[in-house]
Image (cartoon, rainbow, N blue to C red):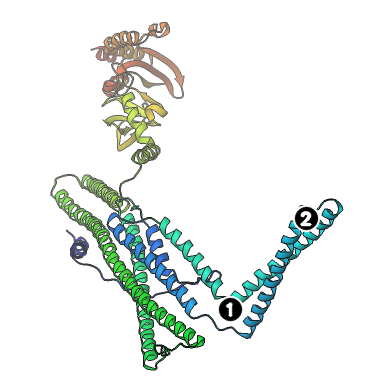
């Protein structure tokens, strides 16, 4: 293994150890989270007469995705929040009854206007009632007059009633309508109670999906929920401390009133107190009773807020455990990825060492090295992507899209594979055949399922010696293109011998001698070629063809050219041509044509 590979392997081993350590830690320990800063958001457009924060917070949590183990905490938070809301409204109503606001000059003026408007409205109502009764008894023109008066009275009543409503609204805004404020509180409490009764906790935990990305999304959602729970817990604790401070202040106020003798002494037995004294004693007693009731309500509210804080704290522990479990599964995925990389590095080094010991050619070793490395990298990337993204949810759709993509990407290989069946057929090619593919001529030395390899040679009119180059073609040429196979049945082909007889020498003896030699040499092969041609075709014109040698004599510059065309086997073509050339050269070298002819004939 090279130094670079050793360094990468060392880093991967260290990361693997760290991931295993984190895996163990997330399984055995609970992570610590900082409580977020409490932030309160108010809506000034719709001010609340009583703070319903605890109930609204519990309702928000109830609407969030909730696991089965979180359901008891959500239900308990709703119940305690509802109790706290009831106590808060009860305390607010009690405070409004015991401590009515002191009227300001502006409020007094509005109250006077309200009283005047109410008196006018009452008078208008009495007048409308009287006119209605009289109109029911009247007839004729008197009834018509009463109808006009009744309509006018009703219109005036509506105007005075609008004035009463407007004055009440102005008085309420000025703080001078305690009864209206109390009624508004009761209406708001009824609406909040209805909302609390209709809120139900349902288990709606998101499905478990594999993959590091989905693990991170799940962890992030749990983390956000945990932050909100921390915020709610801190708000409950802060509210409990605030109520405890109010409780201490109220106790001190009650104690001071007792020390100062704030309650008037009751009249002695047998003595009747004045009306003012009796009213003062009753008022003081009601105030004392109200303070005690407010003190009791404060104690219950403090317990509720602390109970809410405890519920949220326990809920945080459950969410933290789920978050830790998700983190544990994520660390398993990270460990698997590091393991894949580490195995890939070691396997790559082992293959390199194994190929270094083989006795293969350097080019073959490099080819195998490249193929194995690329294959190893592809498999490693696929497995890592599977760990990161998780298995596809729609397996059929995924396989269909993947198949379509591979079909487009591997189109040449698919067509080449089908072309291999064509080449294996009756009209295909075989090893050793002389063929021409895409303008390249050569001998077939390898015929695979996807590729055909030729040993390139010159064209058929040259010496056709191999050039030493191997040419590889995808087998798709058998379907999309065309090819020539010169190795027909029996591998017969026509060849031509050309000889120039110098001027002044009689060419006819040489022509006769060469023709006789060619006929003797190729007669057996010509008969066999004709027989095979007739057997391989049903065409009458092809059956009339014969394979007898043909000779052509024509004058050229410097002498007479003799061209002899004959049939021969493809693998014997070079030997026969060399033999005929040798005979022709020997024939022309003789001084006398007759001895040369006899020698050629022998």
> What residue is pinned by disc 1?
176
Crowd rating for badge 1 (residues with CA inside 10 Å; few <14, some 14–19, many 20+): many
Report the quarter where the N terminus lies.
bottom left
Q: Residue 135 has which mark? A: 2
Give percent across and percent down for residue 575: 26, 23
Left or right: where 349 falls relative to 468? left
Q: Residue 74 has which mark? A: none
Q: Residue at x 41, y 62 (%)?
A: 60
Give percent across and percent down for residue 36: 36, 73
Farthest front residue in view? 270
Secondary structure beneath dot 2 equals helix
Q: Nearer the viewer, residue 500 or 133?
A: 133
Report the quarter where the C terminus lies.
top left
Toward which corner of the image does residue 37 lie, by quadrant?
bottom left
Badges 2 and 1: C-beta atoms under 8 Å apart? no
Q: Nearer the viewer, residue 476 or 552?
A: 476
Q: Residue at x 22, y 57 (%)?
A: 332
Left or right: where 403 falls relative to 583? right
Secondary structure beneath dot 1 equals loop
Crowd rating for badge 2 (residues with CA inside 10 Å; few <14, some 14–19, many 20+): some
Mark pair 2, 1: CA separation: 41 Å
Give percent across and percent down for residue 123: 72, 68
Q: Is residue 601 above or below residue 437?
A: above
Q: Residue at x 22, y 48 (%)?
A: 369
Farthest left residue in view? 357
Is residue 44 at all visible to an observer of this figure? no
Toward which corner of the image does residue 505 lie, by quadrant?
top left
The numbered mark, 2 or 1, whose residue comes first in the sequence reads 2
Q: Nearer the viewer, residue 161 or 365?
A: 161
């Amino acid at each position: 293994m090279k130094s670079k590979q050793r360094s990468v392997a060392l880093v991967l081993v260290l990361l693997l150890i760290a991931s295993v350590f984190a895996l163990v830690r997330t399984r055995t320990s609970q992570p610590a989270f900082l409580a977020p800063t409490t932030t309160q958001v108010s809506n000034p457009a719709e001010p609340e007469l009583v703070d319903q924060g605890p109930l609204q917070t519990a309702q928000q949590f109830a609407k969030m995705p909730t696991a089965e183990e979180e359901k008891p905490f959500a239900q308990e938070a709703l119940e305690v929040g509802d109790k706290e809301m009831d106590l808060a409204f009860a305390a607010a109503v009690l405070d409004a009854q015991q401590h009515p606001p002191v009227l300001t000059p502006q409020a007094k003026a509005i109250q006077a206007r309200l009283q005047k408007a109410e008196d006018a409205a009452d008078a208008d109502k009495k007048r409308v009632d009287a006119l209605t009764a009289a109109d029911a008894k009247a007839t004729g023109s008197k009834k018509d007059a009463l109808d006009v008066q009744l309509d006018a009275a009703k219109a005036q009543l509506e105007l005075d009633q609008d004035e009463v409503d407007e004055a009440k609204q102005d008085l309420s805004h000025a703080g001078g309508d305690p009864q209206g404020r109390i009624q508004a509180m009761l209406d708001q409490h009824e609406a909040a109670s209805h909302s609390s009764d209709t809120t139900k906790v349902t288990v709606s935990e998101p499905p478990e999906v594999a993959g590091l990305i989905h693990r991170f999304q799940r962890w992030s959602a749990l983390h956000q929920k945990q932050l909100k729970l921390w915020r709610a817990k801190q708000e409950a604790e802060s509210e409990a401390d605030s109520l405890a401070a109010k409780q201490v202040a109220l106790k001190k106020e009650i104690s001071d009133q007792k020390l100062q003798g704030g309650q008037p002494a009751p009249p002695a037995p047998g003595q009747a107190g004045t009306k003012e004294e009796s009213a003062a004693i009753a008022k003081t007693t009601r105030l004392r009773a109200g303070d005690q009731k407010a003190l009791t309500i404060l104690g219950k509210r403090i317990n509720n807020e602390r109970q809410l804080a405890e519920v949220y704290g326990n809920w945080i522990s459950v969410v933290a455990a789920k978050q830790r479990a998700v983190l544990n599964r994520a660390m398993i995925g990270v460990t698997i990825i590091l393991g894949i990389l580490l195995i890939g590095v070691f396997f790559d080094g082992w293959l390199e060492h194994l190929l270094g010991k083989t006795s293969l050619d350097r080019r073959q070793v490099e080819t195998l090295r490249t193929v194995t490395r690329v294959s190893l990298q592809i498999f490693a990337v696929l497995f890592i992507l599977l760990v990161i993204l998780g298995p596809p949810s729609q397996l059929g759709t995924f396989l269909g899209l993947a198949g379509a993509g591979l079909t487009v990407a591997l189109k040449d290989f698919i067509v080449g594979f089908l072309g291999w069946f064509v080449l294996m057929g009756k009209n295909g090619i075989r090893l050793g055949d002389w063929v021409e593919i895409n303008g390249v001529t050569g001998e077939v030395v390898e015929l695979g399922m996807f590729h055909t390899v030729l040993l390139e040679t010159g064209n058929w009119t040259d010496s056709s010696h191999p050039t030493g180059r191997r040419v590889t073609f995808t087998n798709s040429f058998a379907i999309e293109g065309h090819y020539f196979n010169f190795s027909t049945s029996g591998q017969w082909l026509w060849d031509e011998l050309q000889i120039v007889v110098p001027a002044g020498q009689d060419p006819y003896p040489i022509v006769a001698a060469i023709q006789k030699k060619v006929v003797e040499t190729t007669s057996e092969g010509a008969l066999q070629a004709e027989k095979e041609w007739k057997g391989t075709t049903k065409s009458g014109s092809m059956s009339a063809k014969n394979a007898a040698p043909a000779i052509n004599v024509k004058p050229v510059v410097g002498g007479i050219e003799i061209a002899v065309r004959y049939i021969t086997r493809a693998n014997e073509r070079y030997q026969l041509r060399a033999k005929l050339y040798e005979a022709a050269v020997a024939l022309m070298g003789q001084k006398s044509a007759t001895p040369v002819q006899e020698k050629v004939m022998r």
